Amino acid sequence: MITFFTIPKPFEGQIGVIQRNAISSWTRTHPDARVLLFGDETGTAEAAAAAGSEHMLEIERSAWGTPLLSDAFAQAERHARGELLCFVNADILLLDDFAPAVARIAALGRPFLAVGESWDTELREPLAFDEGWQERLQALPSRRRGADAIDYFVFRRGLYTGMPPFAIGRTAFDNWLIWHARSRRALVVDATPVVKTLHQRHEYDHGGGLAAIRVSPEAQRNRELAGGNERLYSRFDATHRLTRSGLVRNLGAPLRWKERSRRAAYKLRHGLLRRPL
């Protein structure tokens, strides 16, 4: 059994369609899948009931009123029925390659964290989940979102205790989750080669836009809580990669050479773009 949990936005307009699509896809990953929806945003109780999920009304909030990821993790641990939990962002579609990949990793019997890069796609309509729905999704135009675009975190119970009070959706917390698993000497697996998760493209009006969110006081606070840039890990920092033939050790993980190269290229590219003509 796996317990999925998330902190959704209000179920209004296009983001409401996106979140209902996502949650319904999670319930179809396995007959025993369980989903917990945290918070009191508009429409959450109704969406939980429609998807056969559970509504967890109470959640701690930051000084700015944003739900705290740390409280969602703590509550999910208390309410989970099995050993496996998965925090997943509420705009992510999971397909039938997800559960078998998790089962392969869990079968090793070790503390672990499984993550993967997501793919951006455009989906404007509610999914019918009829015959062939996954094939139609796979056929949609999509593109990789980047090595630090991590939208799901599958882990064994007990890995995340004493988490800093991160505000959800305000940067840094996802990268810290990977660093923390590494610091606990857990198996950290990049499942990107065998799992394709789809991010349904949407606007970020709730925070004044993505650029504004990244420089907001809460984003700065999250980075402080994470402990600095050296703790902001991506999937390139996983200890292993899951391939169709099995686990492969990530030889570059100890020195973080691939992630450091990615960051250097990013800074160079954006530095050139900002250079005056």
Image (cartoon, grey):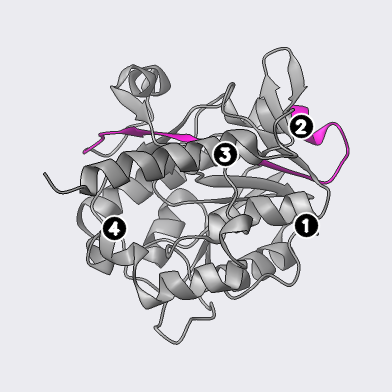
The residue indicated by pointer 3 is: 259
Mark pair 3, 4: CA separation: 23 Å
Q: Residues within 10 Å of mark 1 (few under 14, many from 20)?
A: some
Sequence order check: which comes first, mark 3 or mark 1?
A: 1
Reply above or below: 63 against 258.
below
Query: Could you tell me the amino acid type at mark 4?
Result: Leu
Reply above or below: 253 against 79.
above
Sequence order check: which comes first, mark 3 or mark 2?
A: 2
Closest to the camera, between mark 3 and mark 2, is 3
Query: Could you tell me the amino acid type at mark 3?
Result: Glu
The image quadrant that residue 123 belongs to is: top left
The image quadrant that residue 252 belongs to is: top right
Q: Would you say residue 267 sits in the magenta stretch?
A: no
Q: Residues within 10 Å of mark 4 (few under 14, many from 20)?
A: some
Query: Could you tell me the amino acid type at mark 1?
Result: Leu
Closest to the camera, between mark 3 and mark 4, is 3
Q: Is residue 107 left or right of residue 100?
A: right
The residue indicated by pointer 1 is: 159
Sequence order check: which comes first, mark 3 or mark 4?
A: 4
Q: Residues within 10 Å of mark 2 (few under 14, many from 20)?
A: many
Which region shows up in magenta?
Answer: 104-124
Mark pair 1, 2: CA separation: 15 Å
Q: Secondary structure at mark 3?
A: helix
Sequence order check: which comes first, mark 2 or mark 4?
A: 2
Sequence order check: which comes first, mark 1 or mark 2?
A: 2
The residue indicated by pointer 2 is: 105
Camera-side residue: 57 or 62? 62
Q: Are marks 3 and 2 in contact (CB under 8 Å)?
A: no
Q: Would you say residue 107 sits in the magenta stretch?
A: yes
Residue 218 percent coordinates (x, y) = 42, 75
